[in-house]
Image: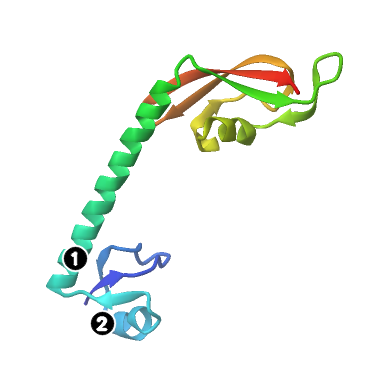
Amino acid sequence: MKVIMLKDVGGVGQRGKVIEVSDGYALNFLIAKGNAIQATPQKIADVEKTNAELAKNAAEKNAAMEQSIRALEGTSVDIKAKVNEKGHLFKKIMKEDVAKALFLSPDTIVDFQGPIKESGEHKIKIAFAGAKATVILKVDSN
């Protein structure tokens, strides 16, 4: 029996996929637990249309993100932090802090040399899909 997965089920299928399983397994487990529905030609067409729209939206979002990353090349971002008289920070700056300042996901920062503990300029490399950029992070005192 063909079913459309409504939820991810380990070893069986992922949400939105049309799979073939035995009738008993489909009726007694997948459909009964609300993990799947029986596939009809109309429902399969609807799922394929939805999956195509999701793929298109994801591609557009990725293209916009790549363009944003390329636009950041050579720019600088300032982060204010408390420093002592020697220029050491009281609180180290983590990858997440830099990502928040750049309005990006921490996953896009690829070259981050540990937590930043000194004031001054630091090079940060970011990448997403095929786009790469180097940003100058300026850590200044409050």
Disc 1 residue crowd, few under 14, some 14–19, many 20+, Cα 10 Å: few
Residue 33 appears in which quarter of the rendering?
bottom left
Name the side, left or right, on which 59 lies relative to 126: left
Tell me whether circle 2 and circle 1 mark residues in contact (CB < 8 Å). no
Question: Where does residue 133 sit, x and y in percent of width and height?
Answer: 45, 20
Question: Where does residue 6 sit, x and y in percent of width and height?
Answer: 34, 70
Closer-to-camera residue (36/59): 59
Q: Residue at x 67, y 32 (%)?
A: 94
Which amino acid type is marked by label 1?
A: Asp
Query: Dot 1: what SS?
Result: helix
Q: Which residue is drawn at 35% across and 27% down?
A: 67
Q: Is residue 7 visible?
A: yes
Q: Is residue 129 visible?
A: no
Disc 2 residue crowd, few under 14, some 14–19, many 20+, Cα 10 Å: few
Question: Where does residue 90 sit, x and y in percent of width and height?
Answer: 82, 28
Whether residue 43 is situated above or below residue 78 in the rendered picture:
below
- Distance CA(mark 2)–CA(mark 1): 22 Å
* Quarter occupied by the N terminus: bottom left
Closer-to-camera residue (17/52): 52
For mark 2, what is the residue?
23
Name the side, left or right, on which 33 lies relative to 95: left
Name the side, left or right, on which 76 lies relative to 53: right
* Quarter occupied by the C terminus: top right
Looking at the image, is mark 2 or mark 1 earlier in the sequence? 2
Q: Which residue lies furthest to the front in this view?
A: 142
For mark 1, what is the residue?
46
* Pair 2/1: label in front: 1
Which amino acid type is marked by label 2?
A: Asp
Q: Which residue is drawn at 50% across and 35% down?
A: 104
Residue 131 appears in which quarter of the rendering?
top left
Query: Dot 2: what SS?
Result: helix
